[in-house]
């Protein structure tokens, strides 16, 4: 019996929908990264993108535990001297909650071209409305 190695031709992709309402942002992000990577499948292969598409709704209502909402900062750099920008997560969650979720998931994926391909299968929505009914997504419960 030979070892099965997945490739792009024999990967079956499904669509899942995850509701982040009232759930910790990091716990949701780790489950989403798990599905995007394809680790929930028995055909998981490290060097092939075997993951599924994920739709996350209600990103606006995901919670940060403890004092993270006031104390945690989002940093990015412009590339110029003195170009470090710091934004508190409270401001991010009010203005662009899908950015907080995207960054949390993105940082849990591989930092290479495979990770960049995986993050393209993620769809984020601040509210409960989404435009992917045609893909017939299955509801996935988060294990917390």
Image (tube, rainbow, N blue to C red):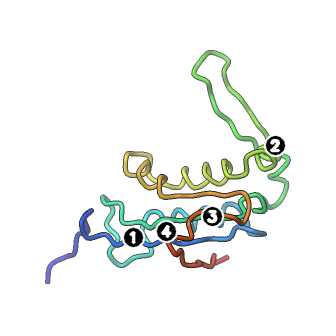
In the picture, measured across the screen, residue 105 lies left or right of residue 75, that is left
Residue 49 at x, y percent in the picture: 36, 60
Residue 125 falls in which quadrant of the image?
Answer: bottom right
Q: Write the residue at 35% across / 71% down.
A: 44
Looking at the image, which is closer to me, 136 or 61?
Answer: 136
Instruction: Quickly name the residue at label 3.
Output: 56
Element marked by disc 4: helix
Dot in front, 4 or 3: 3
Q: Which residue lies furthest to the top in this view?
A: 81
Q: Write the residue at 61% across / 51% down.
A: 102
Q: Earlier in the sequence, mark 4 or mark 3?
A: 4
User: Which numbered dot is residue 132?
Assistant: none
Residue 63 at x, y percent in the picture: 78, 62
Q: Earlier in the sequence, mark 4 or mark 2?
A: 4
User: Where does the C terminus fall, quadrant-wise?
Assistant: bottom right
Q: Earlier in the sequence, mark 1 or mark 3?
A: 1
How far apart are labels 4 and 3 at the CA level? 12 Å
Residue 40 at x, y percent in the picture: 45, 75
User: Where does the N terminus fall, quadrant-wise?
Assistant: bottom left
User: Which numbered dot is residue 35?
Assistant: 4
Instruction: Quickly name the residue at label 2.
Output: 91
Instruction: Quickly name the residue at label 1.
Output: 13
Looking at the image, which is closer to me, 71 or 134?
Answer: 134
Dot in front, 1 or 4: 1
Residue 21 at x, y percent in the picture: 75, 68
How far apart are labels 1 and 3 at the CA level? 17 Å
In the picture, measured across the screen, residue 6 lies left or right of residue 94, that is left
How far apart are labels 4 and 2 at the CA level? 28 Å
Q: Earlier in the sequence, mark 1 or mark 4?
A: 1
């Amino acid at each position: 019996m030979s070892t099965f190695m997945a490739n792009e031709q024999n990967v079956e992709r499904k669509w899942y929908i995850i509701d982040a309402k009232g759930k910790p942002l990091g716990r949701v992000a780790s489950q989403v990264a798990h599905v995007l990577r394809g680790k929930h499948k028995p055909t998981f292969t490290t060097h092939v993108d075997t993951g599924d598409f994920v739709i996350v709704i209600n990103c606006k209502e995901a919670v940060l535990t403890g004092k993270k909402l006031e104390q945690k900062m989002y940093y990015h750099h412009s590339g110029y001297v003195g170009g470090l920008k710091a934004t508190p997560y409270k401001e991010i969650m009010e203005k662009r909650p899908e950015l907080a979720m995207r960054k949390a998931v993105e940082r849990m994926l591989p930092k290479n071209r495979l990770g960049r391909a995986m993050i393209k299968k993620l769809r984020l929505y601040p509210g409960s409305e989404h435009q992917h009914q045609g893909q017939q997504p299955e509801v996935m419960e988060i294990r917390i």
